[in-house]
């Protein structure tokens, strides 16, 4: 992707993020997005087939670098997060939330937050499945793996939601410690 395309894509993501923080996704139109991004309709459709594809791409951009870096998956594109952090999985995510990278706080606390939290959880489930041995203990071995994986992902998503609702008063390290004590 050349610089011009990347800049346009970022403008579309930014416009969409702003709109998501202002109103429900069902009431956002492509016209709203192109007006806010100050681009033409053809430009929008050159990047995204529909608003739903835009939402999917935004979610992937928000979370894929975390999943890619933790899985040691080589990235096939540039992520919208710039980081070189090599923290433990959950701490890495919490630091991005605390830094409000790419307005992630706005998305995770807006009226459309369930869309992002669900996408986030689905990515976490896959990630946790790939690293389940890191979390296993005597009790967890007695549980079905898909149940335990879902439990860890759901608990982490709710932990992040609680932290945001409480205005991020704790450090990422404290929240990480609380979470790890639970699992």
Image (cartoon, grey):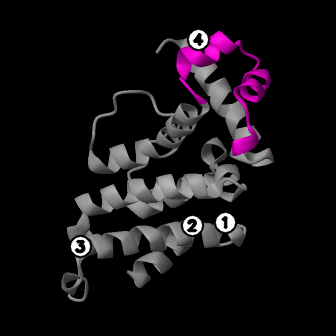
- Which mark is nearer the camera, 3 or 1? 3
Which residue is the site of mark 3?
145
> Alpha-carbon distance for marks 2 and 1?
6 Å
Disc ID at residue 111: none
Q: Element under label 4? A: helix
Q: Are marks 4 and 3 in contact (CB under 8 Å)?
A: no
User: On the rendered image, what quadrant is the C terminus found in?
Assistant: bottom left
Question: Which percent across, then down, holds residue 83?
Answer: 48, 41
Residue 28 in the magenta stretch? The answer is: yes
Looking at the image, is 120 positioned above or below residue 74? below
Q: Residues within 10 Å of mark 4 (few under 14, many from 20)?
A: few
> Alpha-carbon distance for marks 4 and 3?
45 Å
> Alpha-carbon distance for marks 3 and 1?
29 Å
Specify whether residue 7 is in view: no
Disc ID at residue 160: 2
Which residue is the site of mark 4?
4
Looking at the image, is 137 positioned above or below residue 5? below
Q: Residues within 10 Å of mark 1 (few under 14, many from 20)?
A: some
Residues 15 and 28: in front is 28
Residue at the location (53% across, 60% down)?
94
Mark positioned earlier in the residue sequence (3 or 1) = 3
> Alpha-carbon distance for marks 2 and 3?
23 Å
The residue stretch that appears in magenta: 26-50
Residue 57 in the magenta stretch? The answer is: no
Disc ID at residue 164: 1
Mark positioned earlier in the residue sequence (4 or 2) = 4
- Which mark is nearer the camera, 4 or 3? 3
Q: Are marks 2 and 1 in contact (CB under 8 Å)?
A: yes
């Amino acid at each position: 992707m050349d610089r011009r395309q990347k800049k346009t894509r970022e403008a579309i993501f930014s416009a969409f993020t702003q709109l998501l923080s202002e109103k429900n996704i069902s009431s956002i139109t492509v016209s709203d997005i192109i007006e806010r991004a100050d681009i033409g309709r053809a430009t929008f459709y050159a990047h995204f087939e529909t608003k739903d594809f835009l939402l999917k791409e935004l979610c992937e951009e928000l979370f894929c670098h975390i999943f890619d870096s933790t899985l040691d998956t080589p990235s096939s594109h540039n992520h919208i997060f710039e980081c070189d952090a090599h923290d433990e999985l959950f701490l890495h995510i919490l630091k991005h939330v605390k830094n409000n990278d790419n307005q992630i706080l706005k998305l995770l606390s807006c009226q459309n937050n369930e869309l992002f939290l669900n996408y986030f959880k689905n990515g976490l489930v896959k990630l946790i499945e790939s690293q389940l041995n890191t979390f296993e203990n005597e009790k967890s071995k007695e549980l079905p793996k898909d149940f335990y994986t879902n439990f860890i992902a759901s608990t982490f998503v709710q932990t992040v939601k609680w932290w945001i609702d409480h205005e991020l008063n704790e450090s990422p390290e404290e929240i990480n410690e609380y979470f790890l004590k639970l699992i």
